[in-house]
Image (tube, rainbow, N blue to C red):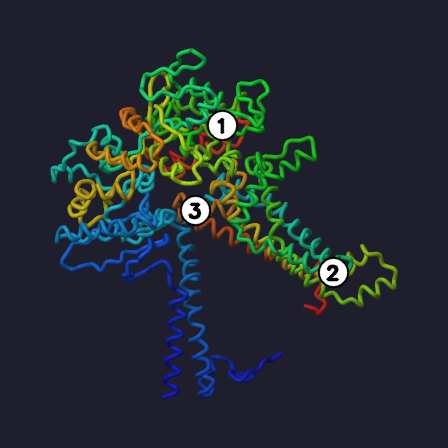
Amino acid sequence: MKTQLFRLTALLALFSFILTACGAPATQATEAPEPTQPPAPQPTTVPTDVPRPDRVQIYWYIGLGTGAQAAQIPLEKEFVEKFNNSQDEIQLIPIIVDNKYARDNLIAQIAAGNAPDIVGPMGTEGRGWFQDAWLDLQPLVDEFNYDLSDIDPAFLEFYKDQGELVGLPFAIFPSALYYNKDLFDEAGLAYPPHKVGEKYVLDGEELEWNFDTLAKVARRLTVDANGNDATSPDFDRNNIVQYGFDFQWVKDSPRWFSAYFEPFYPVNENGEAVLSDGQVEAIKWYYDAMWGEQPFLPTQAAMDTDYLGHSNSFNSGHVAMALTHLWYTCCITPPSDPNVTVPNWDVAVVPSYNGKITAKMHGDTFGIMKTTAHPEEAFKVYAYMLGEGSAELYKIYGGLPARKSQQADFFKSLDEKFAPNKVDWQVFVDMISYLEVPSHEKPLPNIAKSHDAFLQLGSDLRSNPNLDLDARLAEFLTNLTAIYKEAQE
Amino acid sequence: MTTTNHIFPAGRTFMQRKSLSKLARREIHWGLAFLSPWIFGFLVFTLIPMVVSLIFSFTNYNPIHPGQTKFIGLTNWLRLFTDPFMTQAWKVTLRFALISVPLSILFPLGLAVLVNSEYLFAKNIFRTLFYLPTMIPIVVSVIIWGGIMNSETGWLNRAIEFLLPVQGPRWYQDEFWVIPALTIMGFWGVGNAMVVMLAGLQGVPTELYDAAKVDGATGWQRFFHITLPMISPVIFYQLMLSLIGSFQYFTQAYIIGNGRGDPNGATLFYNLYLYRVAFNFLDMGYGATLAWAMFIIVLILTIVLFKTQNRWVYYAGGE
């Protein structure tokens, strides 16, 4: 009896060792009780529902874009439960993965032949990592007579990849120029225009609101420790305490910020890398803004400081203007927070280049994977997400609804967040008409390497004050062409 | 020398287990049973992945398109000799090794001599202080040093500019300065090496120093002719660790260089390049080849180092 008891204990110990040695801490096979507090972010969360034999299972992969934040997870589960209770044909099962691991995790699932059916929400770039993996939705839109009348046709173009409609518009993030009203008031400068076509008045002179004018204003708003602005002969460029302008989180790749000047797909008909004149001019404008005689845009070293909020520069209160997307409202501290740094801000129209405004757009959507065994059922879920269930998803994910009828509620929620500061949200709505085609995120050949080459160029621009720009761009294009060709081989 | 134990008596081998006693067999079974989690883990997480990665190195495996995997012979291995980024990665790694390996021996040795000195007041406090930074996780350490070395607001540059009539380097943005910056950052983590060196120093018999003093040897002579030879096994051990460590350098370069080798490829260490090929560009076949090439090169270097130890490492107790 004693021996048996000893063997049993030893076997249990052995089994527990094996589990400890081999267990993946993040996986949770059984359903956990609903926590009273929002759960802490987990590296991965596997499906918790048990597949039901009487239904078709549709797996929904969340995390490639937003969706894996602790506060979002219970709401997503509620959404899934509501959908599952609304019909008796499909069982929707969420797979929620932390954004940091989502790409690698999805790669592993595809490699294992275990890909989910629906993925999202995700941006164009997220989709681009899995080029050729998405189902063309047009045949399903036709088959189900899916109503697209409430959606701007330009958006549909925006969501096409190589002619295929790989997503339907869900949430959009147009661009505008954020500005700190207090810094303008302090400098005695007029606010930038809120309407397309309005002139900017500088020193009594009416100027077209373009990137040259923006640079002039930004120089006046760039101040050193002694209070001299960048146009002053006494200006000390090594002691800048306030910058006039930044491309807020849209400057890592020159492809991103140059889209504000001129949208252009950098591949010619021979499959070679090429930049448009507008893109080259944008890159030179940007470089001069950091390293020129009168700098007004923070360099990499400046961005890395606590003083500029470790890259959240506009919200540091030390940058007067920032050009970026609507999603940046995420990261401006609201006035209700005691740590507010920019209590009075507003938005203005994007400056023009060569007389034309380009307000580059980000668009989130969902995709159905080509490998799905149940495309029709997946599309039914998809249609629910973008239709009947969309109001709940907008609450979870934010973003301006692509459907016009749902946009007012979204801005109302932002007004509540930033009260008592009043923001002219209409600017964002007006900027939608100026979205860029082709998208600055349209996947490039050999996307991982080509995107990386753009990032390297961006890093070089921000870090190296001694660049021979023409030579650097020529080298860049040679390397990029080689990367494109590698994909063709 | 013959070793004996109660499981395998002298002259018997494991293969002769049939003649073992019941107790001995039972002990073997239980021993293996308790070892099995490790054996299982080793097989599943080390040996099998190594074998699989060797197989991958002869394929074009891409995890997004696993169905398109083809056997491509030695293509990946030949690519090692034509890949320009591979050359860049080796240049960066060797430059770092040449700068940091000697310093990673000399600096902790100097500290160990210092905190071992009979003239030093409050030795234990200094030992603790020098060791403390090793307790800080690498990522945190890199972020702290990012602040110290920031070219605009970091106190290191402010100190340089206060003391000298020059502008401080752009440590992390300048291709020339980034490797020295990483080396300086590495000084913060020499506590472990210092403790090992200190243990070595304290193991040197004091009678050797006494005899040398009687013979009129100066402090430097005692250090070079007694201390160094006596702690040469410790230096050899430290040299091995530093060399292998410099080839495995990754985390600091990944954070400082934004995972891309910024600025302009100056921190594209071999390991970082391997990571990028395999996990950013998803070229798992070539990534596996890079990993195996690294394994082979480090193995060769280790063997070469071991072969040289007869010439300069002194083992007081013989081989």
Q: CA distance from mark 3 to mark 2?
A: 45 Å
Q: Which residue is mark 1?
A: A243
* Image mark 3: chain: B
Circle 3 sits in a helix, a strand or a loop, which is it? helix
Query: Mark 3 against mark 2, which lies toward the viewer?
Result: 2
Q: Amino acid at mark 1?
A: Tyr
Q: CA distance from mark 1 to mark 3?
A: 48 Å
Q: Are marks 1 and 3 in contact (CB under 8 Å)?
A: no
Precedes in sequence: disc 3 or disc 2: 3
Could you say which disc has been placed on residue A224 in the image?
none
Q: Are marks 3 and 2 in contact (CB under 8 Å)?
A: no
Circle 1 sits in a helix, a strand or a loop, which is it? strand
Is A453 or A199 nearer to us in this picture?
A: A199
Circle 2 Cα neighbour tier, 10 Å, few/some/many (<14 / 14–19 / ≥20): some
Q: Which residue is mark 2?
A: B229
Q: Amino acid at mark 3?
A: Asn
Residue displayed at 28% across by 62% down: A30
Expressed as whole percent of the image width and height from the top left, the position of residue A392 reads 23, 44
> Which quadrant is home to the N terminus of chain A?
bottom left
Q: Which residue is mark 3?
A: B76
Expressed as whole percent of the image width and height from the top left, the position of residue A477 reads 43, 28
The answer to whether residue A135 is left or right of residue B106 is left
Query: Mark 2 against mark 1, which lies toward the viewer?
Result: 1
Residue displayed at 81% across by 63% down: B209
Q: Quadrant of residue A129?
A: top left
Q: Quadrant of residue A449?
A: top left
Expressed as whole percent of the image width and height from the top left, the position of residue A162 reads 26, 33
Q: Amino acid at mark 2?
A: Pro
Circle 1 Cα neighbour tier, 10 Å, few/some/many (<14 / 14–19 / ≥20): many
Q: Please determine if labels 1 and 3 lie on a single subunit.
A: no
Residue displayed at 24% across by 46% down: A118
* Image mark 2: chain: B
